[in-house]
Image (spheres, rainbow, N blue to C red):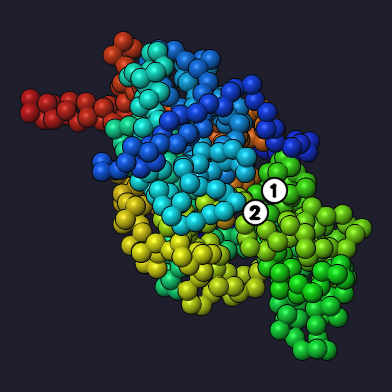
Amino acid sequence: MRPKITITVLLAAVAVAHHPPARVRSNSSSIATQDFTQKVNHSLDASSATFKQRYQLNTQHFKPGGPILFIQSAEAGMSVINTSDFMDYAPKLGALVVMLEHRFFGDLRIGSYPPGYDPMNISKEALSSLTLDNVLQDGVNFVNWIKKTVLGAKNSKVIYAGSSYGGFLAVSARMQYPDTFYGAIASSPALNSFGPTSSNRFKFDSAKWASDVYEEASKGASSKIKTSMLTFKRCLAGKKDNTCESTIPDLNICKNSTVLGYERLYRAVLHTYLAVSKFNYPWIEKYPTANPFENLIKKTLAANTAGEVLRIPLLAAAWGNASSCTDAFNLNISKASTGNIANTQPAFGYINCGYYPINDKSVPSDNVLPETFARGAVDICTNPAWKAVDYGRENEYFLQKYAMTNDFIDTTTRLLIVQGRYDRTAAIGSPILTVTNMLNHSRVVLLNGTAHAEDTVSEAIEPRGLKPEMDQIRDLKLEHLKEWLGQGSQTPDASSGLVSPRCEMFVLSLLLLVMVLLF
């Protein structure tokens, strides 16, 4: 893969990983979900209105004064706390673990919804309190309440964790509220390529990364995908004697669904190619098989025609049967055609329009996939009425607004950013930082063989020994946490006489100076 970014830490594969058996990520937990009374608005002049915000709390391993490992749920309803890797670190740190659901998220039946919000009937007015400031202060208000109500937690240090958009929140929280959040671990955050403008010089980075992932996996499969996608794109613009139905008949689309046109199917295929490596989990989640990227590459190499090649991502997106025709009315196909596979929550669309307009949709001409959104502005926001006043600003404006420049992040302490090698988000979420071994310095880790935020799952989901890279990152995270909390090997310890490398250099310099003065 062509070098794009400087990474402070690179974890290489130390052995061939053994794939775990196909499994569905568990959604069961014995830990009760509770309600916290949260302010609708946190500004000083706000009303006293409140709403019930859901959370899960585990104090099983907590020792008085131990850390608070805080997980901010993000662009989906709150997952089960047992699936978080923080649960694995709790007994080793004497920590309590708590997860807070993001405001305006949940399921259709119940969620953390402020008054007046109905996920089935959405209005802009009902979403007005969905601001970055309110979201971050939800976390501040909540952890301060935890400190007051959990015996022994009054002086506990809080470590913030989030993944994907939640990773962006983790970085933001650490930088904007350093007195509340002592450290932060951000998994697979997008921290660059903001805004819809054509001048965004980072807009192609995500697609280039995805293209390189395909090329590295198999040049043969990549070539087939490129040729087949160009065939599909050309037939969409073809005349009556060159329709997609005649050009790629073995795409095998159900006759009753061709009335929707092939454009929807084309978009579903395009977005599935972009997503399948990103979400290449060793369990069944976004797609009907574990390790869906390897599965797609293997089947592509065995395919003989453009129709056979293109049918592979369509079946993956639809969770379809290989022996049946593909139904364009399929809800999963519809979702894939919009690129909306990671979440189904309408509130996230509002976030994209309001304060998190990330462009990872643009594909350049020299790519495995056809050129897409390469010229002109890109429609990141799906509802024009939701666009914030500064929605159309340049990427550099947002980097300054959120203090997301390399320099700002480089001067932030106790911040760990983790990116997965399969995940194209790594291209727009890996700031260039000072290369150092000091664990209290902000750092970026690029983790081979892993997908989007895969590093955040607990050993209950992905057990130790199945993937060496996951064992490495778990050990590295724990090492960072211990160092941040004063329990690490770089932490000065008067009782043992140990000093940090920086202190050693200072002492040596002082001794040399004394020798010069004396002699």
Residue shown at 78% from the left, 65% from the top: 328
Query: Which amino acid type is shown beneath numbered disc 2?
Result: Ile
As helix, strand or loop, the secondary structure at mark 1 comes to loop
- Measured in 3D between alpha carbons, the distance from the residue under mark 1 to the one under mark 2, in whole angstroms, is 7 Å
Residue behind mark 1: 286
Callout 1 touching callout 2 (CB < 8 Å): yes
Q: Quadrant of residue 509?
A: top left
Q: Residue furthest top?
A: 495
Tell me if I can see residue 89 in this picture. no
State the image coordinates of residue 70 (x, y, percent, origin top left): 46, 30
Q: Is residue 359 left or right of residue 39?
A: right
Residue shown at 33% from the left, 12% from the top: 496
In the rendered image, the quadrant that contains the C terminus is top left
Looking at the image, residue 16 lies above or below residue 331: above
Q: Nearer the viewer, residue 517 or 142?
A: 142
In the rendered image, the quadrant that contains the N terminus is bottom right
Residue behind mark 2: 341
Query: Which amino acid type is shown beneath numbered disc 1?
Result: Lys
Q: Residue furthest front?
A: 116
State the image coordinates of residue 385 (x, y, percent, origin top left): 46, 65
As helix, strand or loop, the secondary structure at mark 2 comes to loop
State the image coordinates of residue 35 (x, y, percent, origin top left): 50, 28
Residue shown at 68% from the left, 59% from the top: 336
State the image coordinates of residue 337 (x, y, percent, origin top left): 67, 64
Q: Quadrant of residue 174?
A: top left
Dot 2 alpha-carbon crowd within 10 angstroms: few under 14, some 14 to 19, many 20 or more: some
